[in-house]
Image: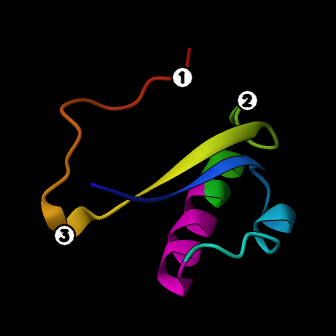
């Protein structure tokens, strides 16, 4: 289940601090994800993206990994 969305944000640690409509836990998880993008030198790091915040307690799972195209 989607609990909230950030319509457009630059995926960097600096702009994440400006994102006010997520909880501290969601912010921590998003920071960890952004750090992984940077560690893996992903093309997504620093790009403008829509971010969906999911409620994992509702049993949401992905059937396969998300693949960058």
- Quadrant assignment for the C terminus: top right
Q: Does the image show residue 40?
A: no
Q: Quarter of the image holding residue 30? A: bottom right
Q: Residue at x 79, y 74 (%)?
A: 17
- Does 26 lie within the magenta span? yes
Instruction: Determine whether the residue tagged by mark 1 lies in a helix, strand or loop.
Output: loop
Image position of 26 with respect to 53: above or below: below
Image position of 54 with respect to 11: above or below: below
Choose between 30 and 36: the one closer to the eye.
30
The alpha-carbon separation of the residues under discs 1 and 2 comes to 9 Å
Percent x, y of residue 60: 19, 52
Numbered disc in front, either 3 or 1: 3
Q: Image check: 65 left or right of 31? A: left
Q: Judge the density around disc 1: few (<14), some (14-19), many (≥20) Cα neighbours within 10 Å.
A: few
Q: Does the image show residue 35?
A: yes
Q: Residue at x 73, y 69 (%)?
A: 19
Percent x, y of residue 4: 48, 61
Percent x, y of residue 13: 79, 64
Percent x, y of residue 39: 67, 50
Q: How many marks?
A: 3
Q: Which residue is mark 3?
A: 57
On residue 68, which mark appears? Answer: 1
Q: Which residue is mark 2?
A: 43
Which segment is the magenta one?
23-33
Circle nearer the N terminus (2, 3): 2
The alpha-carbon separation of the residues under discs 2 and 3 comes to 30 Å
Circle nearer the N terminus (1, 2): 2
Numbered disc in front, either 2 or 3: 3
Q: Quarter of the image holding residue 45? A: top right
- Do the numbered discs 1 and 2 sit on residues whose CB atoms are within 8 Å? yes
Give the residue furthest to the top.
69
């Amino acid at each position: 289940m989607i609990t909230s969305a950030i319509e457009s944000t630059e995926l960097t640690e600096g702009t994440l601090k400006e994102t006010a409509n997520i909880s501290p836990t969601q912010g921590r998880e998003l920071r960890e994800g952004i750090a992984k993008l940077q560690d893996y030198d992903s093309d997504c790091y620093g790009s403008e993206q829509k971010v969906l915040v999911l409620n994992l307690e509702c049993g949401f799972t992905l059937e396969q990994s998300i693949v960058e195209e």
